[in-house]
Amino acid sequence: MSSPVGGETFRFQAEAAQILDLMAHSLYSNKEIFLRELISNASDAIDRLRIERFSRPETVADEPEDAPGIRVAFDKDAGTITISDNGIGMSRQEVIDNIGTIARSGTGEFLRAMSGDQRADTALIGQFGVGFYAAFIVADRVVLTTRRAGLGPDAGVRWSSDGKGEYTLAAVERAERGTTIVLHLRDGEDDLLNEHRLRTIVQRYSDHISLPIAIGDDDAPVNRASALWARPRSELAESDYHEYYRHLTGDYADPLAYLHAKVEGRYEYTLLLFVPSQAPFDLWIPQATHGVKLHVQRVFILEDTGQLMPRHLRFVRGIIDSSDLPLNVSREILQGSRAVEHIRSSAVRKVLALLKDMAKDDPEKYAVFWKQFGAVLKEGVADDPAHREDLAELLRFTSTRSATQDADVSLADYVARMKDGQDKIYYLLAPNPSAAASSPHLEAFRAKDIEVLLLGDAVDNFVVTGLPPEYRGKRLQSVAQGAPDFGALEDATEKEAAEKAGSDYADLIGRLKEHLAGRAWDVRVTSRLTTSPACVVANEADTDFTLARRMRGTGLPNQPVLEINPRHPLVERLNRGQDDPRLADWANVLFDQAVLTAGARLEEPGAFVARLNDLLIALTGETPASN
Ligand SMILES: Nc1ncnc2c1ncn2[C@@H]1O[C@H](COP(=O)(O)OP(=O)(O)OP(=O)(O)O)[C@@H](O)[C@H]1O
């Protein structure tokens, strides 16, 4: 088949050597997984060839259109097992990059998980996708021969290694494209050289591979070779779905939930969608592909980049298989396709329904989901107005009633425990959860035992602006914007006191306004505060405080209003001594303090500190140092 034409020796990267060492020792008790890994690579290689035939047909035009397949052969006398595929193969450089290097993201995690106590945990080990290196669990020498589709027969490459730190590469002739891997089994592994044994292993680990896998000289596939999602649900157990999910994603944990639906009617398609239990590392990388693979009549076509699942559901993994699209469908065609539009909206509805059921039936599981993916789902409130009502039901917040920082309050929970006479849903946008919890804006709400939702996530601005203005007939109201309005929750005596304070403080307010001209848009007495002397809020017509900061990058809204607490001793004292020559300093210090307690930034922190120190020195009776 091939003949070596010289060779060159390379050293493995350090991490690769570590992995190899692990393969040979720790993974031994689960040795059968070597075949799963190699078959999975073969299947990926065949998929990639198929994609290339559509996407860059000119490069592979000369390749024969033979039926795709994977073969596992064995030779008792030589003590070898051979796995071959007629997939895309590799060029010399690809062999160096893919087989000689382990730079994949999962490697570090793998090594960490495999150290310490877990070293012996074979169940865990079996769940990792350890890839090509699994060959060294059972082999002490591995020879891989490959030729990239589209390159000539003289572009064959032979890689071989005993897994001890070095590998050699040689150029070889290879007429057919694809990859052949020969495993020279270690002593004592003869039990694997047995058709029945290999068949059992393939059926156990690779039944879901949708390509035929033959063993020995027999061409009949030993696996079912049918796509899992094409089988009836009644035939499938939860464990089948879980196993398939792990195969599909490389995740080592089970999914949180899945849905499998065959839809018939105007359009025919199958959905097999999973919600993972952990966020993938690339969840926040904007250009990362989404986790849904489009198939047409069970043939893998392409990875979704947003046509099938909207961005706010980008955590969903799985398969969409359509019977209506052409096999040579491209991304451009997808964009204008009615079938795709239909499938997308049905998939979105079904995923939201799945989440809704999870929230209802298994709140603990939903809490896990929310922790991992809540921030992503929130993006949908602004991005997908058509589903904002459904999304509103799925949102979770922390509130002034939360015992922990876990977001576990739904809008429905909030409304259900609103106080008699309360007609608004109060929320506070804050730069982060702890700034929210200590915000002076909450004082009166706390005193009156009115719950306030605390929105400390960067994406929360869009939630607030994207939600319908009312939820179940209750308006959403920021507690840091406009004059506080407690509606029926303010009793007559409080109202009277507020009016009296307004007139008692009218003069002081006039003076403060003068001193704060250009800084505060207005100054007024408030019933919002119980312990703080002052706070800043946004004027009713302006944008919310935190929202403004996030949008404009400034510390304050355009129309900041200083509210003062008439019951605070400092404010009372200023009211009594309005002729104090230091009133301007007091006014500015009050304002700056209010800015700080809101978690905002002072434009001139130096001026604040100087004023404060002058006031402190005046209190001690000393004279300020001149500068
Ligand atoms: N049979 C094959 N044909 C073509 N390329 C292959 C084949 N086997 C491996 N490769 C290449 O080598 C790379 C590394 O393979 P390896 O199995 O170590 O990791 P992986 O398949 O990327 O990830 P994992 O198996 O952990 O999910 C593959 O991504 C692929 O590019």
Image (spheres, rainbow, N blue to C red):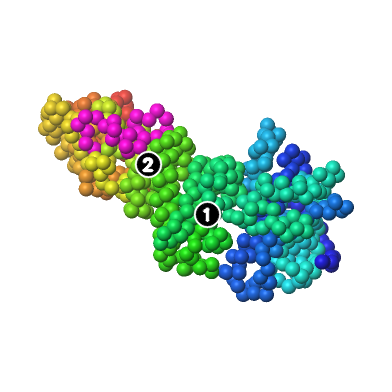
Q: Secondary structure at mark 1?
A: strand
Marks 1 and 2, the one that precedes in the sequence: 1
Left or right, 417 with respect to 252, comes to: left
Per the picture, the main secondary structure of the magenta-coloured stretch is loop
- The magenta stretch spans residue 593: no
Name the amino acid type tagged 2.
Leu
Residue 42 is marked as none
Q: Position of residue 1 (x, y in %)?
A: 82, 66
Above or below 479: residue 550: below
The Cα–Cα distance between marks 1 and 2, rounded to whole angstroms, is: 26 Å
Name the amino acid type tagged 1.
Ile
Using the rendered image of the protein, determine whether residue 581 is visible from the camera's viewpoint.
Answer: no
Left or right, 507 with respect to 36, comes to: left
Which is nearer the eye, 101 or 600?
101
Q: Residue at x 80, y 54 (%)?
A: 74
Locate the C terminus and report the quarter of the image it occupies.
Answer: top left
Q: Secondary structure at mark 2?
A: loop
Q: Is mark 2 within 8 Å of ligand 1?
A: no
Q: Which residues are magenta?
A: 399-424
Q: Which residue is mark 1?
A: 319
Q: Which residue is mark 2?
A: 395
Which is nearer the eye, 174 or 350?
350
